[in-house]
Amino acid sequence: MTARLLCVGDLNADITVAAPSGIADGSDTAGTVAMSGGGSAANVAAWAAECGSPSRFVGVVGADALGDFLADELAGHGVDVRAIRRDDAPSRAIAAIVGSDGNRSMVSSLDPATVLAPSDVAPTWFDDIGWLHLTGYTYLQPTARGAFTRLVEIAAEAGIPWSIDPSSAAMLNDTEQPSDVLAAFSGAAVMFPSHDEAAWMTGVAEPTAAGERLLDIADTVVVTCGDRGAVVARRDRATLHVDAVPADLVNTLGCGDAFAGGFLAGRLAGVDDADCAAQAVRVAARVASIATSR
């Protein structure tokens, strides 16, 4: 199988804690705790594969049993997994706290040993690849920023389009300046900011206007707006709005990743933006109705 989509970045365990009645401070709370494979870049690869796009993933895990589980679980979704195993750190996990409305809050452990180093990057990752997808989590790690830059350089040298999900408005706001982020993400074929990420990067609150302003750095900008659907802005074309697909909301964890995977699978299949976005909202709704991100 030819791998056309290359997703590089985070692969971790998602520890999802759901407490529909709220958490009793200082006492016990009835709820559910589940562990599954996660990570934004890994999720995109998995959902793109689910939508029929052959996908490859490259990322770092620990040389431990959890790392074995994470690599095997992702491969079970039909993804070509090339895990870089490290002895000096355990595999990464994040905790997702899911409220009664299905919205999640995340606590992430960003150990520098669990992210790519520039010396890890290999041009052979791009064999048979037609698209590169990156996430802001790689950019946000100082030790991985050189790897982010090198991946973009290799893609540009090979004429391979690339996409970026900024990933976290809160983390970007804590450590970065919008001008630096815009410079780093400039040249992307597609950018997938959430509404709050688009507003942070542009200073514009209205999602359509924010998406259109980001066309200065990306050919296509898809602003995801939760249950209000998404805005698809593209240079020299009319801006589109796609409605969200109604879903029995259980957990929003991974919905944005699923959206990106569905959209990119459509783009790689050669369908137009309206059909890409329609597939993306369907996949995102599917994820919203399950307890884990994939």
Image (cartoon, rainbow, N blue to C red):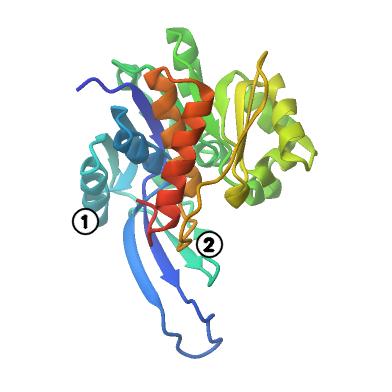
Is any atom of residue 149 visible in this view? no
Q: Residue at x 49, y 41 (%)?
A: 281
Q: Is residue 37 left or right of residue 246?
A: left
Mark 1 secondary-structure assignment: helix
Would you say 88 lies left or right of 173 here?
A: left
Seen at 48% across and 61% down, the residue is: 249
The amino acid type of the residue labelled 2 equals: Arg
Q: Is residue 20 above or below residue 204?
A: below
Asked which quadrant contains residue 289, the reply is bottom left
- Residue nearest the viewer, comparing 19 with 85: 19
> Residue 8: x and y, percent?
40, 33
Residue 50 in the image, given as x and y percentages of width and height:
30, 38
Q: Position of residue 251 (x, y in %)?
A: 46, 61
Label 2 sits on a secondary structure element that is strand
Amino acid type indicated by mark 1? Ala
Q: Residue furthest bottom?
A: 27
89 or 293, which lies in front? 293
Q: Is residue 180 above or below residue 243?
A: above
Picture quarter with the N terminus:
top left
Q: How many numbered tags mark residues here?
A: 2
Question: What residue appears at the point 58 percent right and 42 percent down from the top-left corner?
Answer: 243
Task: Specify few, some or many for label 1: CA neighbours under 10 Å numbering under 14, 14-19, or 20 or more.
Answer: few
Residue at numbered disc 2 = 104
**Position of residue 186 in the picture relative to residue 119 (left or right):** right
Q: Which residue is mark 1?
A: 65
Q: In the image shown, does 289 or 254 lie closer to the viewer?
A: 289
**Residue at 67% over, 13% down:** 236
Which one is earlier in the sequence, the residue at label 2 or at label 1?
A: 1
Q: Which mark is residue 180?
A: none
Measured as percent of width and height from the top left, residue 52 is found at: 29, 30
Whether residue 269 appears in this view of the structure is: yes
